[in-house]
Amino acid sequence: MTLEEKAARIMEILDARFGDPAPTLRFEDPYTLLVAVMLSAQTTDKKVNEVTPGLFALAKTPQAMARQDEAVIRAAIRTIGLAPTKAKRLIALSQRLVEAFDGVVPQDMAALESLPGVGHKTASVVMSQAFGVPAFPVDTHIHRLARRWGLSDGSNVVKTEADLKAIFPKARWNQLHIQIISFGRVFCPARGHEPSQCPICSWAQTNNPH
């Protein structure tokens, strides 16, 4: 089986199981998505969705967030990982948006990555989910599955992103990002995984080109 054939079969399986998946983080606009994605580092989307309603009740625009006291933000997100650091970065991020971008989330990768606390993965999620620009955000789940399925050697997330972009059609990147994460949660977890029972690992691992 060639890599192209493997990719085609994987897409068929993902389409059958998760044809039109919705993003798991709840958001209303580019700013609330940016905040949610930034908060999701080293915690679950479920936990983020639990704290964002209260957080956005306090402030859901860069202008309003920039005016908040750090202790207030920290208290609002205290149940998620790295809350003190994230509170500090969230205020700095919002202040930067107000000062440099008139309070508007930029539709540009480089500009997004220039914001405090925003890395390449976060910027990619915002570009794809908020603006519909083709991107292939690689988090720990996608990085793990790409290696399991023989789509990348798993050396680092930069390599994995490049490999996935080369394998899959650009028009499918945004959808596939969500499909792969959804599939991993249900069928291909990090622990307690039985490859022979997985709709993809059961055949993809035995046809690993790497």
Image (cartoon, rainbow, N blue to C red):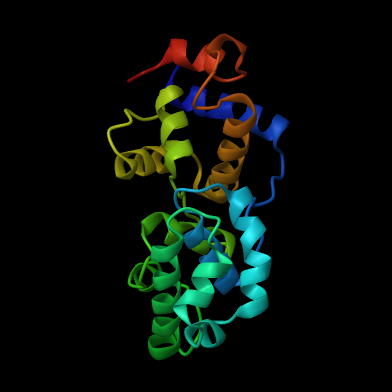
**Residue 209 percent location from the top left of the image:** 36, 18
**Residue 61 percent location from the top left of the image:** 58, 82
Regarding residue 131, the answer to whether it shows in the image is no
133 on left or right of 52 = left
Q: Choose top left, top right, bottom left or bottom right for residue 164.
A: top left
26 on left or right of 121 = right
98 and 161: which one is in front? Answer: 98
Above or below, comparing residue 110 to residue 144 in the picture: below
170 on left or right of 114 = right
**Residue 25 percent location from the top left of the image:** 62, 55
Q: Residue furthest left?
A: 155
- The quarter of the picture where the C terminus appears is top left
152 and 44: which one is in front? Answer: 44
Regarding residue 43, the answer to whether it shows in the image is yes
138 and 56: which one is in front? Answer: 56
Q: Residue at x 37, y 57 (%)?
A: 120
Q: Residue at x 61, y 71 (%)?
A: 55
Q: Residue at x 48, y 37 (%)?
A: 141
Q: Residue at x 68, y 34 (%)?
A: 15
Q: Choose top left, top right, bottom left or bottom right for residue 122.
A: bottom left
Above or below, comparing residue 14 to residue 55 in the picture: above
82 and 2: which one is in front? Answer: 82
